[in-house]
Image: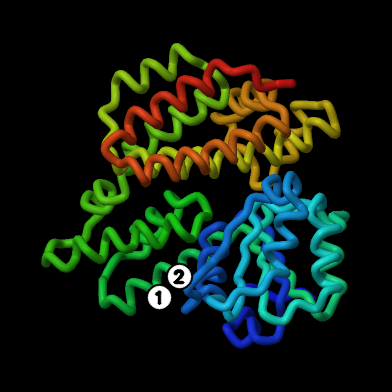
Amino acid sequence: MILKSYELKKSTLNLKKFFLFYGKNEGLKNEAFNILIKDRNKISSYEEKEILDNENNFIENILSKSLFETEKFIIIKRATDKILRIIENLKEKNLEDTTIILNSESLEKKSKLRSFFEKNKTLVCVPFYPENHQTLSKLAYNFLRKKKISISSSNINLIVNKCSGDRETLINELQKIELFSKNGKQINSDNISKLINLSENHNISELIDNCLAQNKRKIISILNENNFSNEDCIMIVRSFIIKSKKLLALTKVFETNKNIDLTISSAKPPIFWKEKEITKQQISKWSSKNIKQLIYSLSETELQIKKNMNNSINLITDFILLQSSVTTNN
């Protein structure tokens, strides 16, 4: 059964035990997760690979009962078609006190996992597609109106354009503006530019692009010229993940058509002409297999940064320098 994200209510949880979330809109996904996991005391999280490597242990943990647990709530990250057989097995066991959410990236229409969830009325499949400018603008308008903050349409567009279609990034930037306005300071274009770090983001974007293109000399130059803060490190790794996911989609197309110019020209959304050359370099450097591993490593690095904020600059610098020199196209 297919549901839109806005149709996903807490009451759905009482009726369904298996959910599939797929797509690249991480901000909207997080909102949906919060709906389902609210008031849950214990949530178990697994990587798909972790389950596949220890299938028997995973199933035993699912089926075992505990005097201290009235229900089990499980999230499976980076789910693919490989997990389908295990899900089919668990579904046949009619689990009453267990809810399982599979979190996937983009799944093609021919995906067996996606088809299984879409066609079965006892399962819930929720796509999370990238949001367009109009949707994010409406979200920004509603947020600012609720907070009674007055900002011009041009400045709202400035904020939305900066967020690259990411709802989570937009909310973070709007919250910065909210805090700034509470001090009674005037909201204008100059203040907004400083608040949302537009100039710093340009350097961050350039840093990530050159890392994906493995231009090590340029990477070192950017690192030496900029004094990134501990807070910037989170922004760097989140931007890195977003750009890596876009590159993953391009590498998959290139591996099918073997034509880099066709891959660039057919990209959606279109690639700006100034970015075409470095994007070609990136596609030629990475295979889809290795870009998937990069995304996984980025998630792990983000976790380490959050746990060790005082050492975040060293962590992200070491990670970037390592990725700039590894073999990635096999």
Q: Which of 253 and 266 is in front in this view?
A: 253
Choose between 101 and 4: the one closer to the eye.
101
Say whether residue 127 is visible. no
Residue 36's quadrant in the figure?
bottom right
- Residue 281, compared with residue 308, is above or below; it is above
Mark 2 is on which residue type? Leu
Q: Nearer the viewer, residue 89 or 160?
A: 89
Residue displayed at 47% across by 79% down: 39
Side (left or right) of 239 relative to 228? right
Query: In the rendered image, which residue does mark 2 sit on?
Result: 139
**Residue identified by numbered label 1:** 142
| Residue 61 sits in quarter | bottom right
**Relative image position of residue 190 (x, y in whole percent):** 22, 49
SS type, badge 1? helix
Dot 2, crowdedness within 10 Å: few (<14), some or many (≥20)?
A: some
**Furthest residue toward front:** 67
